[in-house]
Image (tube, rainbow, N blue to C red):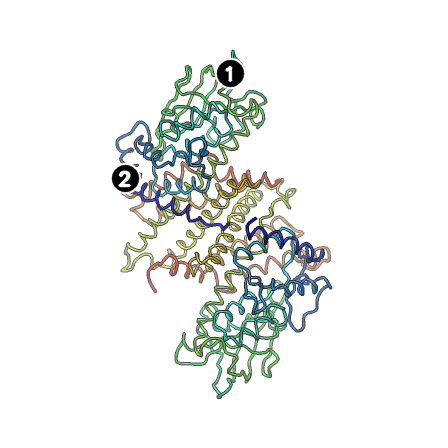
Amino acid sequence: MGLYHTEDQTMLKDSVAPFLAENGSVKHLRALRDNKDPVGFARDLWSQFAEMGLNGILIPEAEGGLGLGHVEAGIVLEEIGKNLTPSPFLTTAVAAVEALKAASADLRGQWFPKIASGEAVIGLALEEGKKHNPAATALKAERSGNGFKLSGTKTFVVHGHVADMLLVSARTAGAPGEEAGITLFAVPREAAGLTAEADRLVDSSMSARVTLDGVQVDADAVIGEVDAGWEPLTRLLNAGRLGASAELVGVGTGAMDMTFTYLKQRKQFGKLIGEFQALQHRAAHLYGEMEGARSIVLKAQQMLDNGDPRGEMFVSAAKAKAAKSTNLAVREGVQMHGGMGMTDAYDIGLYMKRDRALNEVFGDLYFHADKLAKMNGY
Amino acid sequence: MTDLETFRTETRAWLEANCPAEMRQPVKGDDDICWGGRNWVFSSPAQKQWLEVMAAKGWTVPDWPEAYGGGGLSPEETKALRQEMAKLGCRSPLNSFGIWMLGPALLKFGTEEQKKHYLPQIARGEIRWCQGYSEPGSGSDLVSLQTFGEDKGDHWVVNGQKIWTSYADKADWIFCLVRTNKEDKYNGISFLLFDMTTPGVSTKPILLISGASPFCETFFDNVVVPKHQIVGELNRGWDVAKYLLAHEREMISGMGGDGGMASLGSFYADVLEDNPVLRAEMAMFEVENLAYRAHSERFMDEWKTGRAHPAYSNLMKYVGTELNKKRHEIIMAAGGSDALEWESARTNGGARPRAWLRTKANSIEGGTSEVMLNVVSKRILEMPGA
């Protein structure tokens, strides 16, 4: 197998790219933002995703999905990134689906069909502080009746206010900071005692602070084993981190392409600014950085799909590199657009905002560089 | 099993049976790297044996045609062979400018006679080649070169000077850019091959900041070169040179400097524990290193299957050499004052600082980083202007 897309994967890209350019473009994002849309994404577009089969991309064929892998999910996410499409695809069709693969047949039977059909959106209630730290989970789940009673707060729950179900990490044993003793729960958002307070983020997405005040769930709401939620959580995080990396590559590539086009159109001192070597060298350097990000993301995708034991380490390298390169792409993008880059009318600023949010999701550059170091014993 | 899986299994078995244990040890010094040639002294019987069995199989040049001493392997098989060699820790049996640079140019531009004559000798490591490109006044602006070959009917008489000729003092033959037409800058250069023992050829090693002399000044004083020793057409040597440079950059990127995917930081865990900012630098370097390894693998896969942009090796050369310089900066910082020792036996004669200084040439030789960025910007990104 080569480190490039197969024919089938290229065909998937060729069908997703025009679909999103048509239906999920930056214009679509602007419309939602300007209308102060309370949901944060368009439900009809989510249904269209389902009609194309995309929502079931990671769901096994036997359970009604396409049974494809992280490479394919990444192809969709890269196009989402290029177009800045507001969509629950990453949280629901990628991260949540991976966690649910470790769930009971009942839970899978309950949620996979709804995800595949575009009826359901899943929120990820994993964070409690302002920086990504899944092991720091302190939200309490105490045995109660036939199940558990959950109490605590979660932050940065994207689409949390409109999700049908939340995946909630909770502590059933041990202390915050420990991987053991965490349990992952599937909690209906309508559950009594659960409140979600939504706010619009810098990139116009909607994210919630979620409070669970003695929320009662049955024992069968547990995903995987009690106290051993780190396992499905790791699956979720690998998929989510790598998915966010693919989306970042899309954002960076979109910003870069837009900037290179501008360099070939804008004239100053009687010349196209792309003729100036000072800008040419920075453009070429940026291109190299984005190509490196694209490569490590693809490598990590193939590793996860092949069950390579180094997968988790490469996921961290991929998220870190994608974060670093894309951040360069949007900063250079705004700078090279000059004054136009500061205006709301130009799209480049929207790419900068999306990059900031995606950098933070599932751990930023610093989190993942640190994780890589720890995995290598220092 | 697919054919490729069968090939992989058989290759692994063959390597296990034929690669001497000594040749599976990490390379420690220059003597461990075999360059071949008329005057090569093998550092051990195992080094000689490993070269011979690999050459007999055609695997010093696995993807060259069998007719010219190669292994005739497909790109997938070549990759599988390299992966299996890496897994077992097998050393490269032969390092050679003939394999990396001249060979691919001969395969593309050589006559059938030239291919049959030179390629098998390169594959067996019998001729060590050096490259005569740069001149004192022609570095990045290589095409301004002045070394002149005067037409004397059945031969040229070459006069001039080259600089930065790698291992010219150890090489048997040179592939050399020579001006054969003074009127036409680009279409006035020819690509000639000649023996370094030809009367009139002399070399003088250049002492570098590392204290070593891997490069020479090379002088040509009325050197006679027969006409059949030209590669490609008269005055079209620049085409050959450009093609060859692309391969050189491909090789540099394929090797990607000194390190593999192995963690550099894990070697320095004790130092990093007490130096959190250095630890952070190291972690950032490791991110870049893994990204670069994947980038390099992707480039090779795309290049061998015709998917890569023809100028892409310029990008890899830039990224790979800059990363290697960064690697050595970090190694020096992690080494602290120990890494300053220049002569002591326990530092293997200051191997670390000398290697660090050597890497500073990475982004100069074979096209400077600045020239690489020019090429990427114009040919890949299609930026406007001359």
Dividing the picture into quadrants, the one containing residue A372 is top right
Q: Nearer the viewer, residue B145 or B293?
A: B293
The subunit letter for the residue under badge 2 reads: A
Structural crowding at the residue carrying mark 2, measured as other residues with C-alpha within 10 Å and reported as few (<14), some (14–19) or many (≥20): some
Q: Position of residue B10 (x, y in %)?
A: 63, 54
Name the residue at 28% across, 59% down.
A269
Name the disc covering residue A27, or none: 2
Question: In this image, A36 relative to B212: left or right?
Answer: left
Secondary structure found at label 2: helix
Question: In this image, B285 relative to A97: left or right?
Answer: right
Image quarter in which the C terminus of chain A is found: top right
Secondary structure found at label 1: strand
The subunit letter for the residue under badge 1 reads: A
Q: Nearer the viewer, residue A333 or A64?
A: A64
**Position above or below: B6 against B54:** above
Name the disc covering residue A148, or none: 1
From the viewer's perspective, is the residue at label 2 or at label 1 nearer?
Answer: 1
Q: Position of residue A265 (x, y in %)?
A: 28, 54
Disc 2 marks which amino acid? Lys
Disc 1 marks which amino acid? Phe
Q: Name, please, the residue furthest toward the top.
A: A145
Question: In this image, B186 relative to B17: left or right?
Answer: left
Question: In this image, B349 relative to B368: left or right?
Answer: right
Dividing the picture into quadrants, the one containing residue A323 is top left
